[in-house]
Image (spheres, rainbow, N blue to C red):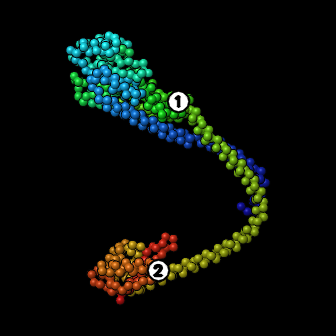
Amino acid sequence: MDSRSTSGRLPYLWWLLPLAILVLGLILTALLAPGSQTPVNTLAQEVSRAHHDKLSRALISQARDVLTAALDLGLTSSTVDSFQDDVAPFLSAFPEVAGVELLTTVSHAQRAGAERRLSAQAGRSVSFSSWTGPRQSKAAEPADHYLVISQGRFQPDNPGVPGLGLVATSVPHWRQALQQAIEEGRPTVTTLTGLEHNGSLSRALWVFVPLSGPGQFSDDSAFLVLVILPDPWLKHQLSELHDERWQVEIHDISQHARRPLATLPAAQPLASDIAPVRSVISLANREWMVSTYPSAGWLDDFRHQARLPVWLTGLSITLLATGLCGWVCYRLIASERQLQLRSLRNHRLKQQLDNTGVEKNILHHSLQQSDRRTQDMIELSPGIFAELDEQRRIGYLSPQTAILLGIPTTELTDTHLDTLFSADSHQELAILFDAARQGQSVERLDTELITRDGQPLPVTLRVKAIRDPLSGWSGFRISLTPR
C-alpha cells in the first residue's frame, strides 16, 4: 500500500472500519455461542458415562456378594429354628433382599406329615397347592414328589410372608428358571412375576440358588430362594452412590417391556435433548439393561456456565478490536509521514542485503573449495582416515582401506574399530581413546592392523576426540599411517 492510496482511503477507514468490526464481532459472537453447547454436551455425556460405569460396577459387585453369601449359608433341609437362626444374619447383612424361602422335595408318602408341620409353622391350615393365577390356587394333584416352599423368613419391615405349601413347579414363570438352575447347578432368576399365595409378595424377582449339584430333579433337590423387590433392591444397592442429578432405570432384556423393572428417580425432570447412557449387566442367568438419564436442570446449569463466558469473551474482544482499529486509523496518518523515510532506509538495507548475499556466495565458494581440498588431501594421503562414534563404531573410512587392508569400506561401516586389530592390542586402544578424550589432544600409538588375509600391517594410529558443545562428546577422528 503506497502513501497515496492510504491517504485516499483514510476517511472511510476512520468512520466505517471500526463500525464494521463492531457489527462483525457481535454477529460472530451470536453465531459461535450455540457452538459452545457441543463440548458441554460431550462433557455431560462423559460425566454421565463415568457415573453410569460406577453404578454398573457397584450393581454387579453387590449382586455377586449376595449370591456368594447365600451359597455360604449351607442350608439343605434345616429345621424351622435353625433356618430362622441361619437366615436372620443374612437378611440383616443384605437389607436389599426382601425375604428368603427354602424349597425342598417332599415325597407323596411324606405329604400329610409335611402339611401338618407347615400348618403348625404358619399357625393356620396349610396344604400343598398349585398356583393357577393371581390370588388363585387349588389343591396339588397327587404326584411322586413335590417341590414345595417349606420354610421362609422376610425382613421385619417387609409386608410379605412365606408362601408355605406352594408347589414351585406349578408356577409357569418359575419352571424354566428351576430347570436351568438344577441342570446347570448355578443360581437363576425369574422374570418379574406377580404372585400372591398365602400372603407372598406380588411383582417380585425370585432367585433360585441350588443346594445340590447339577443334574435333574430328584429326591434331594433343594433350593434357597431369594425374594427381591426391584425398586427397594435398587435403592439399597445404590444408596451410597446414587446422585439425584440422574435417573437410574433397569430393564429386563428378556421381557422386552417398556416399563422398567426398577427405577431410582432424579430430583428434577429429565433432559430430552441428550441420550441416556446404557449398558448390560448380568445377574445369574439373566441380562439387564441399566440406563442413566441426566436431569434437565443439571444440564441447563452446565450450559449457562458455558454460554456466559462465550458472550463476555466475544463482547470484550469486539470492543477491544473496535478501539484498536480506531487507534490504528489515527496512527495511520502519522505513519504515512514516516513512510518515505522508511522507504529510503529500506533501499539502503536492500543494498546491504545484496552485498551480504555476494559475501555469502564468496564464503560458500570458499567453503566448497576447502571441502574439496580436504577430500583431495584424504585421497592423496597414503594412510587411512576414519570417523568413529563414542562406542568406536566406524561411521566413515577413506578409500585407502581397500588398498591397504584389502577390505571394501562398505563391509567395515558400522562395525567396531577393534575388529581391525589383534586381541592383544584392544586394551592399548581403549587406553589411547580414553586419553584422547580426557586430554583433549591428539594421541599417538604405534600398532598393527590385520589385513583380510590375516597379515599384520604396522601403522601409526593418531586419535582426536570430537566434542559437541551442546551434547558433549560425539566421537573420534583417527588416522592410520603405514610405518
Work out whether mark 1 precedes mark 2 in sequence or the reverse, and give the earlier one: 1
* Amino acid under disc 1: Ala
Where is residue 234, by image quadrant? top left
Residue 4 in the image: above or below residue 246: below
Asked whether, in this view, residue 135 is left or right of residue 2, the answer is: left
Q: Pointer 1: residues within 10 angstroms few (<14), some, or many (20+)?
A: some
- Tell me where residue 19 appears, x and y as whole percent: 74, 48
Q: Which residue is mark 1?
A: 266
In percent of the image, x 44 and y 85: which residue is there? 377
Residue at (27, 25) in percent of width and height: 76
The answer to whether any part of residue 462 appears in the image is: yes
Image quadrant in which you'd find residue 83: top left
Q: Position of residue 409 (x, y in %)?
A: 36, 77
Considering the numbered disc 1 on the image, is that residue within a helix, a strand or a loop? loop
Side (left or right) of 113 relative to 200: left
Label 1 close to label 2 by CB (< 8 Å): no
Q: Residue at x 44, y 31 (%)?
A: 237
Q: Which residue is mark 2?
A: 440
The secondary element bearing badge 2 is classed as loop
Q: Residues within 10 Å of mark 2 (few under 14, many from 20)?
A: some
Q: Work out which quarter of the rendered image holds the C terminus and state it.
A: bottom left
Q: Which residue is drawn at the image coordinates 49% and 70% (left, top)?
A: 471
Locate residue 106 relative to residue 352 in the image: left or right: left
Three-letter code for the amino acid on which mark 2 is drawn = Gln
Residue 179 seen anywhere in this rendered image of the structure: no
